[in-house]
Image: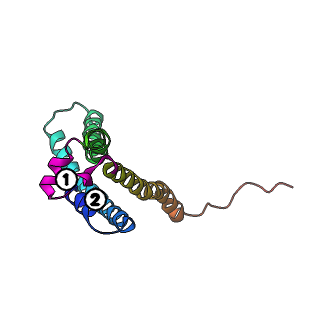
Amino acid sequence: LYTAWTHIHASAHTLAVKTMLVVILSTLWGVLIEALNWSVFLRVARALNAFENWRTIAQRETQLALKLFAFLFVDGFLWYFLLAFFHIPFGGKFAGKVAELFAMQSDDFSVHFWMHALVTSVQTMLSLTVPLASACSVLPTALRLMRAPPAPPSTSAPSC
């Protein structure tokens, strides 16, 4: 991810093209994160939970949920914590070393670069996840209502 960010930023493209590339990269990264979350981390959490001896099913499920929360939290928010608490405050101090590593100019990794990366990532995440979360919360109820049998006619005596 870092390599892609730096190459996009150091390219000769216009700001609009760079922003679009960052949005595409963030979208692909989000899809990859979700695939990892539910294919790899779920299996790891279940395997770790299988080694423990819980007295009740409720305790076992609670611990599995805590493990999944820890995995998903670190996996989903580590990039934002790194940007907000490492790159933005200290970006200028290690810009020269990163520039040497990628053979670029050190001003390519200024605080403004990392602020733009953070803002674009957060905007992309919110623009994709808010509608998706809304659809996921409404869709099961809508499907359930569509499959529900019609209510039987009322059998009470007509009132006159």
Q: Quadrant of the N terminus?
A: bottom left
Q: Position of residue 136 (x, y in %)?
A: 44, 57
In the picture as drawn, the residue positioned furthest to the top comes out as 55
| In-front residue for pair 56/123 | 123
Q: Which residue is mark 1?
A: 40
Q: Residues within 10 Å of mark 1 (few under 14, many from 20)?
A: few
**Quadrant assignment for the C terminus:** bottom right
Q: Earlier in the sequence, mark 2 or mark 1?
A: 2
Q: Amino acid at mark 1?
A: Val
Main secondary structure found in the magenta portion: helix
Nearer to us: label 2 or label 1: 2
* Residue drawn where x is 49% and y is 59% of the image: 144
The residue singled out by tag 2 in the image is 29
Q: Residue furthest right?
A: 160
The secondary structure type at the circle numbered 2 is helix
> Which amino acid, by three-letter code, is at mark 2?
Trp
